[in-house]
Amino acid sequence: PTAHEPTTAPAEVTAFPTARHTGCPFDPPAELAALREESPLRRMRYPDGHHGWLATGHAAVRAIMADPRFSARYELLHLPMPGFEEVEIPPAAPGDFTGMDAPGHTRYRRLLTGRFTVRRMRLLTERVEELTAEHLDAMAAQGPGLDLVEAYAHPVPAQMICELLGVPYADRKQFTGHVATLFDQRADIEAKGAAYGAVESYVKGLVAAKRAEPTDDLLSDLTGTDLTDEELAGVGSLLLGAGLDTTANMIALGAFALLSHPEQLAALRAEPGLAGPAVEELLRYLTVADPAVRTALEDVEVDGRLIRAGDTVTLSFQAANRDPARFPGPDRLDLRRAATGHVAFGHGAHQCLGQQLARVEMQIALPALLRRFPTLRLAVEPSEVPLREQNNIYGVRSLPVTWDQT
Ligand code: HEM
């Protein structure tokens, strides 16, 4: 053994743990905590036979995510989920900058960052409040006993990202199913390719329309940059896909977590000032987007271990966000905790572009829901709530709720 491969190195993990439903619906798979405790960065054998790594500790995850020697290029990756052993993953399509490194990635981020600033997103506050109120009114009119995902958690952020981009919400049947396929870990590479193609060709049609007749929205605005139509369609598809289901799952799973922690729920309902910290803590505690995957471009030493060029690392944000070395009592939902530094939006160059929008949406939507329905509760046993297993975005498939009509 070399200095980098101590004889005490923990055994290689042979499967990436993904089943979250084994105990509490809000907790990461139990194996992840055990693996992190033993070693926050360790070897993992991938389903295709690749001997790569698994990072579960907060410090290791942040260090790797911040290091440009780790690449996000799709074609270099080995995937930790089974089902992709035989396939070659194609490089990122034009505009799909999640799968690109600098300088290509930097060019897209530069064009977009200014359009997603805290200030710009705060300007949307009023519109989020209106949309929230409209949907709460519709829920009240419908009466107790409904699915919170369908009535509230999904439509509010979906309508918001559509309006921001300039995508007609009325067209949603043309893309929501395809976006769902992109995140579904049970869909194979052909299904994912077809789904991406369908979303991209839908957005391409819109881009052509905006070039001919610009409207007041982000896609029209971007036609004034040097992006080609193909790149614009890729950027539009990425933003639509990333904005459609992520915040929706945080709102629905967040509501479920709060309903399961009545004292925390009561605090959020009573104290408007708690909305900001509460959302950060819910992001940390629930970590719906997980994991990230990166490949070392050269030999890199992290945490005393040598990651060799070509090695893939799977980074578990949910394990990092429950690391007791960073968050004391990590398995406790505590809305008053200062949860800053969590990695629920990732970290480094690819850190979530839409995080300020997501924050505004969650900080408005969750307290408004609790205040509008003071007796809101689950309409089924917690164990009967269907969970989004085997999905890149965790959450609930539906959340049956009810309340007392006054
Ligand atoms: C990237 C989470 C909402 C757009 C990411 C990443 C995470 C994440 C973890 C990093 C992935 C990686 O490095 O591999 C979330 C969560 C959300 C949310 C938890 C909701 C609570 C949104 C929204 C948008 C968005 C509303 C809409 C604009 C993006 C984009 C990227 C990204 C474009 C890629 C950034 C890049 O590669 O440079 N998100 N996201 N996200 N997110 Fe979000």
Image (spheres, helix red, strand yellow):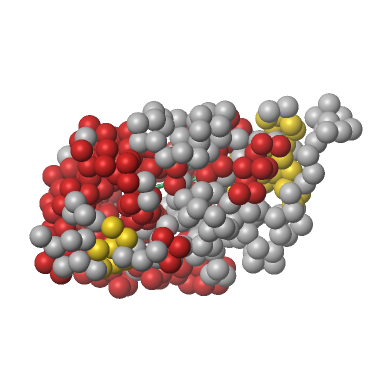
Percent x, y for residue 127? 15, 49
Q: Residue at 36% across / 66% down in the picture?
A: 380
Q: Can you give x and y, in whole percent of width and height, for residue 31 in the image?
A: 65, 49
Q: Residue drawn 38% across and 42% down? A: 282
Q: Residue at x 47, y 50 (%)?
A: 26
Q: Position of residue 30 (x, y in %)?
A: 61, 49
User: Considering only vertical position in the picture, is 385 above or below 321?
Assistant: below
Res. 56 image quadrant: top right
Would residue 162 be visible to someone looking at this image?
no
**Vertical position of residue 49 compared to residue 142: above or below:** above
Q: Is residue 280 left or right of residue 303?
A: left
170 vs 165, nearest the viewer: 170
Name the quarter where the N terminus is drawn: top right
Reply above or below: 300 against 255. Answer: above
Could you tell me which residue is drawn at 18 percent across and 54 percent down?
373
Query: In which image quadrant can residue 298 be found?
Result: top right
* Screen quadrant of the C terminus: bottom left
Could one spot residue 5 in this view of the protein?
yes
- Left or right, 365 with respect to 314, comes to left
Viewer-closest of 314 and 95: 314
Return the residue nearer the eye: 362 or 97.
362
Rendering coords of residue 120 (x, y %): 22, 38
Count all numbered tags in the image, as a single digit. 0
Q: Quadrant of residue 34?
A: top right
